[in-house]
Amino acid sequence: MKLLLLNPPHPAIGSRIPREHLPPLGLLALGGPLLDAGHQVELLDAEFGPLTTAEMVGRVCHASPDAVLVGHSGSTSAHPTVVEVTRALRAARPDLWIVYGGVYPTYHWRDILEREPQIDAIVRGEGEATVVRLVDALERQADLEAVPGIAFRRAAAGPVVDASLPGPTAGRVVATAPAPVIEELDAYRVGWELIDFARYSYWGQRRAVVVQFSRGCPHRCNYCGQREFWRRWRHRDPIRFARELAWLYREHGVEVINFADENPTASRAAWQAFLDALVAEGVPLILVGSTRADDIVRDADLLPLYRRAGVARFLLGLESMDERTLRSIQKGSRRETDREAIRLLRHNGILSMVAYVAGFEEETDLDYWRALRQIVAYDPDQIQALYATPHRWTPYFEKAAGRRVIQPDLGRWDYKHQVLATRRVPPWRLIVWVKLIEAVVQLRPRSLRRVLAHPDRALRAAMRWYYRIGRQVWPYELWHFLFHDRRVARGPTLSEFLGSPSGNF
């Protein structure tokens, strides 16, 4: 079949401001197996532009595929855009198969198929094996119920979906059995040939890609929207993975490797084997990603190896400075560990970025003042302030089910907008606190001295790049809060807005 992978533009502020883009790893991970199965595959990355709905439809019609496979890494906040463009595609190409995948559709498959008749099928969970089976079934006009890991609308006419009549059909929504977990991550390759590497950059216009060494996380944070999707932690072969990164550098000039892993360092042995293999390859890569503070403390003796391999920055998900909140969300971390992790990273020439999450229900102004003082005491190099954002497939959703939704636009559910009401702090005061925390952490004298005079020239340049983005994003977010974000004073409860909790595919 002739297939087009569609990456719709993300509405998030961070995707619009820097004018730098990273390739859509999720779609490329599907592209490799589909190419190897003999299909014609093309990628349309609508982040560039970004393309309007009309432009996306025009490009798809010009490519004339048999099927469009659409998905986005910002799954929840991208959903309204997916709905808009798939409706337009259905009107322009009634004969087109439209397949949708990602975290949000994995758990909202029934709602989507009942409300959006233009979408023919949804891939649930990991897609590499599932999408090959699905496309094969579509091509053979076979019964889709034999394909594990999907949901679809069974045509009213009979048990076989007629491939000559895709699109809106009457009939019941069907979900097949979950697809098996992919045990061997190296069994499926990334379709790197689908992109022009020169178009993608990060870290200050350096050629960059997104990769995964591992999937899942062994920890049980109850707000995490990724943990159950991957189902359990697994990792790629460390030596083969290092060899692939070296190939990306040598053959395509890739300089920056951005890890999409939730917790790449979960296994000390596997992570050390990867670092050793990458050092042996002798390629000057820049590695950035996220991990847990306790892994950094655990690996205190390995941090010089981290640096030799090219690790330049790790984001540490501290989430909250309040012990009650940390217990409530089951973070499983301690403030002493967080502080020590930042100190160790700095001692080894690695930048630290902390993720701080605001907007938990019982927080007060005093809590935010304490959080500011605590973060300053931690002394991180950078901060990423986010808002508590619930997903109905997480245990946190059940705790927050009775809270009021103040942001009914799912396109704003990107962790950078407050979506739930807080009991004691109104939205205007919460954003003041968040912006104040960001400004104080980044503009205090100690931080500015590092930006101006860090002994490592490359890290100094990276910090200046991050500050340049912040100077644009910080006022942009305030402007949108005041004049563009359409909040409601008393919206529906979370369960009324998103439905009953559901942790199943």
Image (cartoon, rainbow, N blue to C red):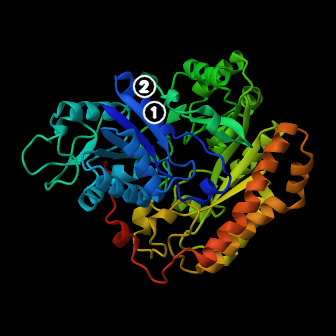
Seen in the picture, residue 34 relative to 399 is either above or below; the reply is: above
Residue 355 spot, x, y in % from top left: 65, 55
Q: Quadrant of residue 252?
A: top right
Residue drawn where x is 43% and y is 38% of the image = 232
Is residue 273 found left or right of 498 in the rendered image?
A: right
Residue 331 spot, x, y in % from top left: 56, 53
Between residues 372 and 456, which one lies in front from this camera angle?
A: 456
Is there any visible trace of residue 232 in the rendered image? yes
Is residue 168 found left or right of 308 in the rendered image?
A: left
Q: Quadrant of residue 266?
A: top right
Amino acid under disc 2: Tyr
Between residues 246 and 45, which one lies in front from this camera angle?
A: 45
Is residue 340 found left or right of 334 in the rendered image?
A: right
Query: The residue tagged with tag 2: helix, strand or loop?
Result: loop
The disc at residue 46 is: none
Seen in the picture, residue 487 relative to 78 is either above or below; the reply is: below
Contact between marks 1 and 2 (CB within 8 A): the answer is yes
Seen in the picture, residue 381 relative to 435 is either above or below; the reply is: above
Dot 1: few (<14), some (14–19), or many (≥20) neighbours within 10 Å?
some
Is residue 175 found left or right of 29 in the rendered image?
A: left
Please name the residue that numbered disc 1 is placed on: 29
Residue drawn where x is 22% and y is 33% of the image = 137
Amino acid under disc 1: Ala
Q: Quadrant of the N terminus?
A: top left
Please name the residue that numbered disc 2 is placed on: 188
Is there any visible trace of residue 126 in the rendered image? no
Residue 281 spot, x, y in % from top left: 69, 17
The residue sitting at the top extreme is 280
In the rendered structure, which disc, 1 or 2, sits on the residue that comes first in sequence?
1
Residue 461 spot, x, y in % from top left: 83, 43
